[in-house]
Image (cartoon, rainbow, N blue to C red):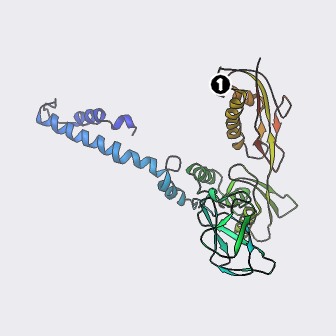
Amino acid sequence: MSDAENIFEAILDRMKSSLELDITDIEGTWTGDMLQTVANELARIYSCEIKPMYDKAFVRTARGEDLDNCCADYGIERNPATCSEGVVTLTGQPGIYKNLKAMADNIIFDLVPEEIVVPDTGNVDVKCICISPGAAGNVPAAAINRLAGAAPGVTVVNNSQTSGGYDVETDASLRSRTLEHIAEPGISGNIANYKEWALDVSGVESVQIFDLARGNGTVDVVIIADGNTVASQPLLDAVHEHIERLRPIGADVQVQAAENYNIEVTAVVKARAGYSEEVLAALFYQILQQYLTGLNKRNSIISYLKIADLLFSCEGIDDVTEYTMNGQKKSIVMPDRFFPTAVMPVIRREE
């Protein structure tokens, strides 16, 4: 029954029409008051207890833990957050140092192994692992610059860029994966199977599958990392290891990183007062980036006319005089194994 059929008035009307006795059911009579009381409680039960259950019971509408439960029915689990890793260089007096931790601002990293030996050269490279999972642990080179706690003898701490830290999978991503699984179930090592296996790994945002890529029995899995970025080698290794455990016997699988394909828009526009060219460029960059992120599929077409629509939707732009995309006035068909990324656009105000 629809929501309209379960409101107080509709329930009351149905109850009154079901009365077979020739008695008065107007408000103020015993029968009328009893019917209203029951109708009111039934309407409350529906709106407060039954209707919310519908939203919790289906993949399209459930959220949080309820969505986890719905997706689990199809064997799909939310990808957990992961800890970033990297390499730290310690410089200091030769010796053995135990249980060291390093810091980048207030982000703490464990240094591995527990016993670190600084040789006579005074320098040693060690692995670092962020103690807190999530993308915040992905720090640039030279950001890890001190130890957490005293360690007499270690005078310099430096690092290469850390990577591999990914936030827990969002509801939107989990919902999308599950609905795709329902629509195109993975069976016996088909393309849908390989796509699901790749997306099972934390940090994979999108994937392209190329069957028979290098001949019979070969499959190339090309992935794009979270944030519409190029996948790191540790992420490629994690995907490869996961697929190797699940793939059909005899399949030759290679996991590769898709390369980014820069998209630059240059436009001359009529803009409202108070919007500088820099502000307009920043606003349009966000719109363009969101649009391109949704196109990470094989044979994606970046429509030239769609770019005009995006420009008109940008806050502060009243009209578009002219524009180009990568210096041309035509659509772009993405080549295989590439994905589009936005670069800061060039927006000029019409004089």
Reply above or below: 227 against 108.
Answer: above
Q: Quadrant of the C terminus?
A: top right
Q: Is residue 186 left or right of residue 51?
A: right
| Foreground pick, 277 / 26 | 277
Q: Residue at x 66, y 76 (%)?
A: 152
Secondary structure beneath label 1: loop
Relative side of 316 to 218, left or right = left
Tell me which corner region of the image, top left, top right, bottom left or bottom right, holds residue 153: bottom right
Closer to us: 193 or 286: 286
The amino acid type found where label 1 is placed reads Gly
Q: Is residue 107 above or below residue 61?
A: below
Task: Kindly give the residue lying farthest to the right in the view shown.
Answer: 215
Q: Residue 77, percent across and down? A: 57, 61
Disc 1 crowd rating (10 Å Cα; few below 14, some 14-19, many 20+) is many
Q: Position of residue 201 (x, y in %)?
A: 66, 61
224 vs 189: above or below: above
Q: Which residue: 22% across, 41% down? A: 38
Q: Does residue 229 sit above or below 137 in this rendering?
A: above
Tell me the quarter of the picture where residue 160 sits. Answer: bottom right
Q: Position of residue 179 (x, y in %)?
A: 59, 50
Q: Dividing the image into 4 quarters, which one contains the N terminus?
A: top left
Q: Quadrant of residue 37?
A: top left
Name the residue: 80% across, 57% down: 211
Left or right, 215 with reference to 318: right
Residue 157: percent from the left, percent from the top?
Answer: 71, 67
The residue sitting at the top extreme is 351
Can you identify the residue that label 1 sits on?
316
